[in-house]
Image (cartoon, rainbow, N blue to C red):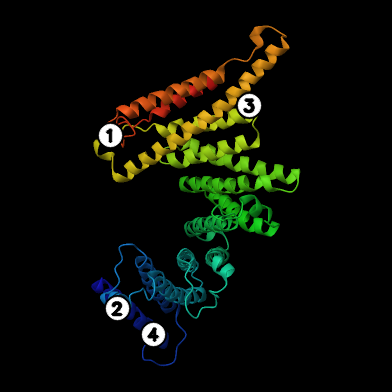
Amino acid sequence: DSAKKNESDDSVDGLKKNILSMSTGGNGAAPVVAAPLLRQRLGDACNEIGQILLSESRGVLLPQFSPPNDIRLMMANSGKSIFGMSHVSAIMLASAQFWFLDGLARFTEGKDLRNLALLRCNLCQCCKIRANTNVILPGSSEDPSSLGKKKSNSESYLQEAVDHLVAAHDAMGQRDADPVTWDMVSEELAATLLVLGVRRRQSTLSSSSPEPLILQAMRLTPGAEKAIVEPMERSCAIYESLGTPKASHQAAAAHYQLALYFSKVWTCQRDEARTREKLAAAFEHYGAAHRYFFRHVRGNEATFVVLSLDFSNLYSAVSGEEECLSKALQCCLDTRAAFSFPALPDNAMAPALSATMEQIATLSESIEARVSKLLLSLVKIEKGKKSNLKAAATGPKSLLPSDKYTNMYRKVLGYKMMSRNKQSNEQDEGNRWEDPSSPTFPIFELLETLSEGLA
C-alpha cells in the first residue's frame, strides 16, 4: 500500500510540475497565453491528475482497503476513529473536481468538444460518488445540523451530476458533432437521471418511515411529484432513443421504477379522474417492463419474477373480480421460464450462480404462495356462480360454469403434498434442485400445467 501510495504521489507531483511549467512559460515567470497545442496538453495533464485522485477516492472506499500504518496507529491510540474513509474519499474528490474544472477551462478555451464532454463525465462521476457517501466536509457551505438539508444532500450532488452532463450536450450542440461521444454522454445522463428519480421517490415515499405510506402519498404536491417522475421519464426516453441492447434493458428498468411509483400513489388521489390517470400509468409502465423481461428472461430471472409478482399484486388490488384475478394469475404463470435453466457444464456451478439459484428457489416459494392464494379466490368465485345458477334453476346444466379453477387448485394442492414428502426424504436440505447440470425447479412443471389449464 505504501509503495502504491508513493508511486501515485510521484505521478501527481510530476504532473503538477509540468502544469506549473506550461502555465508560467517554463521559468517561473508570469503566465503566458498558451498556444492551442500547449493548452490541450495542459488540459490533458489536469485531467490525468483528476483521474488519479478519482481512482484513489474509489479505492479507499473498498472493503479490503487498509489505512497506512501511521493512520492506523493514531486511530488505535485514540480508541476511536478520527475520521472515516468516506471523509478521505470526499477530500480526494474535492481535489479531483478542482483539477477537472481547471482542465475543463482549458478545453473550453480551445473549443475541444470531445475532451470537454469527457471531463464533464468525470465531474459527473465525482458527484455520484459524493452522493453515495453523502459526506459533508468541514468548512463546506452545507449545514450538518439541518436534518432536511442533510437528507437532500445526496440529491443535490446527483442534480449537479445531471447539470454537468446537460452542459456537455449543450456544448456539443448536436449529435452529428461526435456521435460516439454524444451517445456516451446520453447513456451516462440517462443512468444519472434514473438514480436521481429513484432516490427522490425513496426519500419521499419511504417504507421504513413510521408514517403510513398513504399519508406520505397524500402530502405529495404537484411539484414534488414532478421532481420524482420527470427524471425517470427523461431517462426512459433517452434510453429508448439510443436503441442499443443495453439501453433497451435500462429503459425497461426505468419503466419498472416508474410503475413502482404510480402503483404506490394511485389509491391516494383526491378525485376519480386522477386515480384513473395514475392507475393507467402504472399499468402502462408495468406492461412495458413485463414485455421486455418476458422476452429476455435469461440472465434476468430474479428481476422478472419480482416484477411479475408486483404486476400481479396491482391487478388484484384493482378488483377482486374474476377478470382481474385471472390476469393476476397469468402474471404468475408467465414466470415459468425463469425456473427452467439450460444445461450447464460441470464447472458452471460457481458461487455466483449458486447464489442466484438459491434466490430463484426462494422466489419459487413466493410464486407458489401467490398462485395458491389467487386460485383459492377464483375457486370461491367459481363456486358462487355455480350456486347462483343452481338456485335460479334456469337453463340447461351445460351452461353451468366449469370446474376450471377447482381443478387447477387441486393440482396446486398435489404439488404441495409432493414437495412436503420430498423435503422429508431429502438428506441434504440445501439442494433445492435435482440435477445441477440441468437445474429445472419443480414449480416449472406446475406452472406449465396450470398455464395449459388456464388457456
**What residue is pinned by disc 2?**
77
Residue at the image position 58 percent from the left and 22 percent from the top: 379
Instruction: Name the quarter where the N terminus is drawn.
Output: bottom left
Numbered mark located on residue 322 in the image? 3
Determine the CA span between mark 1 and mark 4: 68 Å
Determine the CA span between mark 1 and mark 2: 49 Å
Q: What secondary structure is found at the residue carrying circle 4?
A: helix
Whichever of callouts 2 and 3 sits on the residue coming sooner in the sequence is: 2
**Would you place residue 215 above or below residue 432 in this image?**
below
Residue 395 percent across, percent down from the top left: 71, 8
- In the rendered structure, which amino acid carries the disc numbered 1? Asp
Determine the CA span between mark 3 and mark 1: 41 Å
**What residue is pinned by disc 1?**
428
Q: What secondary structure is found at the residue carrying circle 3?
A: helix
Numbered mark located on residue 20 in the image? 4
Please tell me whether mark 2 or mark 3 is closer to you in this view. 2
Circle 2 crowding by C-alpha within 10 Å: few under 14, some 14–19, many from 20? few
Residue 344 percent across, percent down from the top left: 30, 34
Whichever of callouts 3 and 1 sits on the residue coming sooner in the sequence is: 3
Q: Residue 316 sits in which quadrant?
A: top right
- In the image as oriented, which residue stretches furthest toward the bottom? 29
Circle 1 crowding by C-alpha within 10 Å: few under 14, some 14–19, many from 20? few
Instruction: Count up the numbered dots.
Output: 4
Q: Work out whether residue 183 or residue 356 is closer to the camera in this orientation and state it.
A: 356
Q: Are marks 2 and 4 in contact (CB under 8 Å)?
A: no
Determine the CA span between mark 2 and mark 4: 40 Å
- In the rendered structure, which amino acid carries the disc numbered 2? Asn
Whichever of callouts 1 and 4 sits on the residue coming sooner in the sequence is: 4
Q: What secondary structure is found at the residue carrying circle 1?
A: loop
Determine the CA span between mark 2 and mark 3: 69 Å
